[in-house]
Image (cartoon, helix red, strand yellow):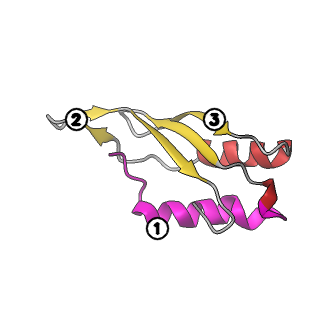
Amino acid sequence: EAVYPGGYVGLTQYINEEVINKITHDSELPQFVNFTISEKGDVEDVQIIRYNGVHETDQMIIDAIGNMSKWFPAKNSTGEPVSEEISIPILGIGC
């Protein structure tokens, strides 16, 4: 599986700092964000699932996910890097 630098704790901290702490109400949050981690560890194809209807918040989330640091890419059974689709919940207490 692809891994964010700092693992789950690092990812949660990033989402809290770049999204959760910048919004005024938890009701502004969508439920899930999907994106792909490329073979090179780049974040690609960010999509919000179940939009909340607050364009500014949706765009902030898309921007934050799209601007994340490179990930350590997933690897197949022979150790070759491969792309992987990721889906994370965005909740009022972090991801």
Q: Amino acid at mark 2?
A: Asn
Task: Give the SS element for disc 3.
Answer: strand
Per the image, the residue denoted by label 1 is: 9
Residue 51 in the figure: left or right of residue 15: right
Q: Amino acid at mark 3?
A: Gln
How would you rate the neighbour count of disc 2 (Cα within 10 Å): few for under 14, some for 14-19, many for 20 or more? few
Q: Position of residue 48 (x, y in %)?
A: 66, 39
Taking the spot 60% from the left edge, 43% from the top edge, the residue there is 33
Q: Earlier in the sequence, mark 2 or mark 3?
A: 3
> Where, by quadrant of the figure, is residue 50 drawn?
top right
Q: Earlier in the sequence, mark 1 or mark 2?
A: 1
Magenta region = 1-26
> Magenta stretch mostly in which secondary structure?
helix
Residue 18 vertical position relative to residue 42 in the rendered view, above or below: below
Q: Which mark is residue 47?
A: 3
Task: Give the SS element for disc 1.
Answer: helix
Q: Which mark is residue 76?
A: 2
Taking the spot 83% from the left edge, 64% from the top edge, the residue there is 25
Task: Give the SS element for disc 2.
Answer: loop
How would you rate the neighbour count of disc 3 (Cα within 10 Å): few for under 14, some for 14-19, many for 20 or more? some
Q: Amino acid at mark 1?
A: Val
